[in-house]
Amino acid sequence: MEVQIAAAKINKYAVSESGDTLEAVERPNGGLSVVLADGQTSGRGAKAVSMMVVRKVIGLLAEGVRDGAAARAASDALFTDKQGKVTCTLNIASIDLHSNTIVLARNNPAPVYICRGDRIDFLNEESSALGVSRNIRPVITELELQVGLSIIIFTDGITHAGERRGQPMDVTETIRALIEDQDPSPQEMADALLGHAIQLDDTRPADDISVLVIKVTSRQGDHVRRMNIRLPINA
Protein backbone atom coordinates (compact mmCIF):
# COMPACT_ATOMS: atom_id res chain seq x y z
CA MET A 1 0.00 0.00 0.00
CA GLU A 2 0.89 3.64 -0.28
CA VAL A 3 -0.82 6.86 0.72
CA GLN A 4 -1.06 9.69 -1.77
CA ILE A 5 -1.89 13.22 -0.63
CA ALA A 6 -2.78 16.21 -2.79
CA ALA A 7 -4.16 19.69 -2.19
CA ALA A 8 -5.43 22.65 -4.17
CA LYS A 9 -6.18 26.09 -2.75
CA ILE A 10 -6.95 29.61 -3.89
CA ASN A 11 -7.44 33.00 -2.27
CA LYS A 12 -10.70 34.88 -2.06
CA TYR A 13 -11.11 37.09 -5.11
CA ALA A 14 -9.14 40.37 -4.91
CA VAL A 15 -7.55 39.40 -1.57
CA SER A 16 -3.76 39.04 -1.59
CA GLU A 17 -3.47 36.55 1.29
CA SER A 18 -5.43 33.39 2.01
CA GLY A 19 -6.84 32.87 5.49
CA ASP A 20 -6.31 29.11 4.98
CA THR A 21 -3.05 27.47 6.05
CA LEU A 22 -2.00 23.94 5.10
CA GLU A 23 1.07 22.16 6.49
CA ALA A 24 2.44 18.61 6.74
CA VAL A 25 4.69 17.23 9.47
CA GLU A 26 6.33 13.85 10.00
CA ARG A 27 5.29 12.00 13.13
CA PRO A 28 7.78 10.44 15.57
CA ASN A 29 6.66 6.91 14.61
CA GLY A 30 7.36 7.51 10.92
CA GLY A 31 3.84 8.51 9.98
CA LEU A 32 2.66 11.83 8.62
CA SER A 33 0.10 14.44 9.62
CA VAL A 34 -1.53 17.05 7.41
CA VAL A 35 -3.05 20.07 9.13
CA LEU A 36 -5.55 22.48 7.53
CA ALA A 37 -6.82 25.60 9.31
CA ASP A 38 -9.13 28.41 8.21
CA GLY A 39 -8.99 31.67 10.17
CA GLN A 40 -12.14 33.70 10.68
CA THR A 41 -12.93 36.12 7.80
CA SER A 42 -10.16 36.50 5.18
CA GLY A 43 -6.99 38.38 4.40
CA ARG A 44 -3.95 39.13 6.54
CA GLY A 45 -5.72 38.88 9.90
CA ALA A 46 -7.22 35.50 9.09
CA LYS A 47 -3.84 34.29 7.81
CA ALA A 48 -2.15 35.25 11.07
CA VAL A 49 -4.75 33.30 13.04
CA SER A 50 -4.58 30.15 10.92
CA MET A 51 -0.78 30.19 10.92
CA MET A 52 -0.71 30.53 14.71
CA VAL A 53 -3.03 27.55 15.05
CA VAL A 54 -1.17 25.37 12.55
CA ARG A 55 2.25 26.12 14.04
CA LYS A 56 0.98 25.23 17.50
CA VAL A 57 -0.52 21.97 16.26
CA ILE A 58 2.40 20.75 14.15
CA GLY A 59 4.88 21.60 16.90
CA LEU A 60 2.97 19.40 19.33
CA LEU A 61 2.44 16.59 16.82
CA ALA A 62 6.18 16.52 16.07
CA GLU A 63 6.81 16.02 19.79
CA GLY A 64 4.49 13.01 19.88
CA VAL A 65 1.43 14.71 21.37
CA ARG A 66 -1.87 13.08 20.35
CA ASP A 67 -3.95 14.82 17.73
CA GLY A 68 -6.88 15.58 20.01
CA ALA A 69 -4.64 17.08 22.69
CA ALA A 70 -2.84 19.19 20.08
CA ALA A 71 -6.17 20.53 18.80
CA ARG A 72 -7.37 21.36 22.32
CA ALA A 73 -4.10 23.14 23.12
CA ALA A 74 -4.36 25.23 19.94
CA SER A 75 -7.95 26.15 20.78
CA ASP A 76 -7.02 27.23 24.32
CA ALA A 77 -4.12 29.29 22.98
CA LEU A 78 -6.38 31.02 20.45
CA PHE A 79 -9.08 31.65 23.06
CA THR A 80 -6.55 33.16 25.44
CA ASP A 81 -4.89 35.32 22.79
CA LYS A 82 -8.10 36.61 21.20
CA GLN A 83 -10.37 36.47 24.30
CA GLY A 84 -12.91 34.33 22.48
CA LYS A 85 -13.54 36.94 19.76
CA VAL A 86 -11.85 35.11 16.88
CA THR A 87 -12.38 31.54 15.69
CA CYS A 88 -10.54 29.15 13.41
CA THR A 89 -11.58 25.83 11.92
CA LEU A 90 -9.12 22.94 12.03
CA ASN A 91 -8.73 19.54 10.38
CA ILE A 92 -5.93 17.11 11.17
CA ALA A 93 -5.43 13.95 9.12
CA SER A 94 -2.76 11.61 10.47
CA ILE A 95 -1.37 8.49 8.85
CA ASP A 96 -0.38 6.39 11.85
CA LEU A 97 2.02 3.62 10.85
CA HIS A 98 1.92 2.09 14.32
CA SER A 99 -1.81 1.31 14.16
CA ASN A 100 -2.10 1.26 10.34
CA THR A 101 -4.94 3.77 10.51
CA ILE A 102 -5.78 7.27 9.41
CA VAL A 103 -6.89 9.42 12.34
CA LEU A 104 -9.13 12.38 11.52
CA ALA A 105 -9.53 15.19 14.04
CA ARG A 106 -12.16 17.75 13.06
CA ASN A 107 -13.02 21.16 14.50
CA ASN A 108 -14.93 22.28 11.45
CA PRO A 109 -18.66 22.40 10.69
CA ALA A 110 -17.88 21.40 7.09
CA PRO A 111 -18.14 17.63 6.66
CA VAL A 112 -15.35 15.25 5.69
CA TYR A 113 -16.14 12.89 2.81
CA ILE A 114 -15.08 9.23 2.86
CA CYS A 115 -15.06 7.25 -0.40
CA ARG A 116 -14.63 3.48 -0.62
CA GLY A 117 -14.97 2.46 -4.25
CA ASP A 118 -18.30 3.88 -5.43
CA ARG A 119 -19.63 4.32 -1.89
CA ILE A 120 -19.65 7.86 -0.52
CA ASP A 121 -20.09 8.58 3.19
CA PHE A 122 -19.46 11.74 5.15
CA LEU A 123 -18.61 12.73 8.70
CA ASN A 124 -20.91 15.53 9.77
CA GLU A 125 -21.23 15.22 13.54
CA GLU A 126 -21.63 18.59 15.22
CA SER A 127 -18.21 20.18 15.52
CA SER A 128 -17.12 23.53 16.96
CA ALA A 129 -14.38 25.76 15.61
CA LEU A 130 -11.38 26.54 17.79
CA GLY A 131 -11.31 29.58 20.05
CA VAL A 132 -15.01 29.91 20.90
CA SER A 133 -14.51 28.81 24.52
CA ARG A 134 -12.24 26.76 26.71
CA ASN A 135 -12.15 22.95 26.53
CA ILE A 136 -13.14 22.74 22.87
CA ARG A 137 -12.64 19.15 21.71
CA PRO A 138 -12.33 17.79 18.18
CA VAL A 139 -14.45 15.03 16.71
CA ILE A 140 -12.09 12.05 16.29
CA THR A 141 -12.57 9.32 13.67
CA GLU A 142 -10.15 6.46 13.03
CA LEU A 143 -10.19 4.57 9.73
CA GLU A 144 -8.25 1.45 8.80
CA LEU A 145 -5.71 1.89 6.03
CA GLN A 146 -7.22 0.01 3.08
CA VAL A 147 -6.62 0.19 -0.65
CA GLY A 148 -9.41 2.18 -2.29
CA LEU A 149 -10.03 4.53 0.64
CA SER A 150 -10.22 8.23 -0.25
CA ILE A 151 -10.73 11.11 2.20
CA ILE A 152 -11.77 14.60 1.09
CA ILE A 153 -11.36 17.54 3.44
CA PHE A 154 -12.12 21.19 2.64
CA THR A 155 -12.67 24.64 4.09
CA ASP A 156 -16.02 26.43 3.92
CA GLY A 157 -15.19 28.11 0.62
CA ILE A 158 -16.38 24.86 -0.94
CA THR A 159 -19.53 24.74 1.21
CA HIS A 160 -20.57 28.26 0.23
CA ALA A 161 -19.51 28.19 -3.43
CA GLY A 162 -22.32 29.35 -5.72
CA GLU A 163 -24.55 30.63 -2.91
CA ARG A 164 -24.46 34.26 -4.03
CA ARG A 165 -26.12 33.35 -7.34
CA GLY A 166 -28.49 30.80 -5.83
CA GLN A 167 -26.70 27.71 -7.12
CA PRO A 168 -24.89 26.20 -4.11
CA MET A 169 -22.42 23.43 -4.79
CA ASP A 170 -23.68 19.87 -4.36
CA VAL A 171 -20.47 18.35 -3.03
CA THR A 172 -21.77 14.78 -2.90
CA GLU A 173 -22.89 14.76 -6.52
CA THR A 174 -19.69 16.46 -7.66
CA ILE A 175 -17.63 13.74 -5.97
CA ARG A 176 -19.90 11.03 -7.36
CA ALA A 177 -19.43 12.34 -10.90
CA LEU A 178 -15.66 12.26 -10.37
CA ILE A 179 -15.42 8.68 -9.17
CA GLU A 180 -18.05 7.02 -11.37
CA ASP A 181 -16.41 4.78 -13.99
CA GLN A 182 -12.97 6.27 -13.34
CA ASP A 183 -10.18 6.25 -10.79
CA PRO A 184 -9.00 9.86 -10.40
CA SER A 185 -5.74 10.66 -8.65
CA PRO A 186 -5.89 12.76 -5.46
CA GLN A 187 -4.64 15.78 -7.40
CA GLU A 188 -7.27 15.34 -10.08
CA MET A 189 -9.97 15.16 -7.41
CA ALA A 190 -8.70 18.23 -5.56
CA ASP A 191 -8.34 20.23 -8.78
CA ALA A 192 -11.80 19.23 -10.02
CA LEU A 193 -13.55 20.17 -6.77
CA LEU A 194 -11.72 23.48 -6.57
CA GLY A 195 -12.35 24.21 -10.25
CA HIS A 196 -16.08 23.54 -9.94
CA ALA A 197 -16.33 25.80 -6.88
CA ILE A 198 -14.53 28.62 -8.72
CA GLN A 199 -16.85 28.18 -11.71
CA LEU A 200 -19.92 28.44 -9.45
CA ASP A 201 -18.50 31.70 -8.09
CA ASP A 202 -18.13 33.07 -11.65
CA THR A 203 -14.31 32.71 -11.45
CA ARG A 204 -14.27 35.16 -8.53
CA PRO A 205 -14.09 33.02 -5.37
CA ALA A 206 -16.30 34.46 -2.64
CA ASP A 207 -14.04 32.99 0.04
CA ASP A 208 -10.66 31.31 0.45
CA ILE A 209 -10.97 27.71 -0.75
CA SER A 210 -8.77 24.75 0.17
CA VAL A 211 -9.27 21.11 -0.78
CA LEU A 212 -7.21 18.23 0.64
CA VAL A 213 -7.49 14.68 -0.73
CA ILE A 214 -5.91 11.58 0.77
CA LYS A 215 -6.04 8.29 -1.12
CA VAL A 216 -4.79 4.80 -0.22
CA THR A 217 -3.60 2.87 -3.27
CA SER A 218 -1.58 -0.20 -4.11
CA ARG A 219 2.13 0.46 -3.86
CA GLN A 220 3.60 1.81 -7.06
CA GLY A 221 7.35 1.79 -7.69
CA ASP A 222 10.10 2.23 -5.11
CA HIS A 223 10.19 3.13 -1.41
CA VAL A 224 11.06 6.80 -1.94
CA ARG A 225 8.80 9.42 -0.34
CA ARG A 226 8.04 12.32 -2.67
CA MET A 227 6.32 15.69 -2.44
CA ASN A 228 5.45 18.12 -5.24
CA ILE A 229 4.43 21.74 -4.64
CA ARG A 230 3.30 24.36 -7.14
CA LEU A 231 3.32 28.00 -6.00
CA PRO A 232 2.14 30.50 -8.67
CA ILE A 233 3.65 33.97 -8.20
CA ASN A 234 2.28 37.21 -9.63
CA ALA A 235 5.35 39.01 -10.94
Image (spheres, grey):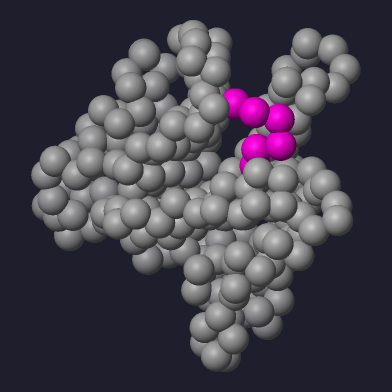
The image shows residue 210, relative to residue 163, as above or below, that is above
Residue 49: percent from left, percent from top:
34, 49
Residue at point 61% right, 65% down?
A: 172
Residue at point 44% right, 32% down?
A: 142
View extreme (bottom): residue: 165
**Residue 8 shown left or right of residue 90 in the figure:** right
The image shows residue 146, relative to residue 172, as above or below, that is above
The image shows residue 218, relative to residue 15, as above or below, that is above
The image shows residue 165, relative to residue 91, as above or below, that is below
Residue 163: percent from left, percent from top:
52, 83
Tell me if residue 4 can be seen: no
Q: Quadrant of the N terminus?
A: top right
Q: Quadrant of the C terminus?
A: bottom right
**Residue 29 shown left or right of residue 191 in the figure:** left
Q: Is residue 147 magenta?
A: yes
Q: Is residue 47 magenta?
A: no
Residue 159: percent from left, percent from top:
50, 68
Tell me if residue 125 can be seen: yes
Image: magenta residue range: 145-150
**Residue 201 shown left or right of residue 56 in the figure:** right
**Residue 202 shown left or right of residue 138 in the figure:** right
Residue at point 80% right, 58% down?
A: 180
Q: Nearer the viewer, residue 153 or 133?
A: 153
Residue 212: percent from left, percent from top:
60, 46
Q: How many marks?
A: 0
The answer to which quarter of the image holds residue 229 is top right
Q: Nearer the viewer, residue 53 or 183?
A: 183
Q: Nearer the viewer, residue 204 or 191?
A: 191
Residue at point 37% right, 14% down?
A: 64
- Specify the principal SS of the magenta part: loop
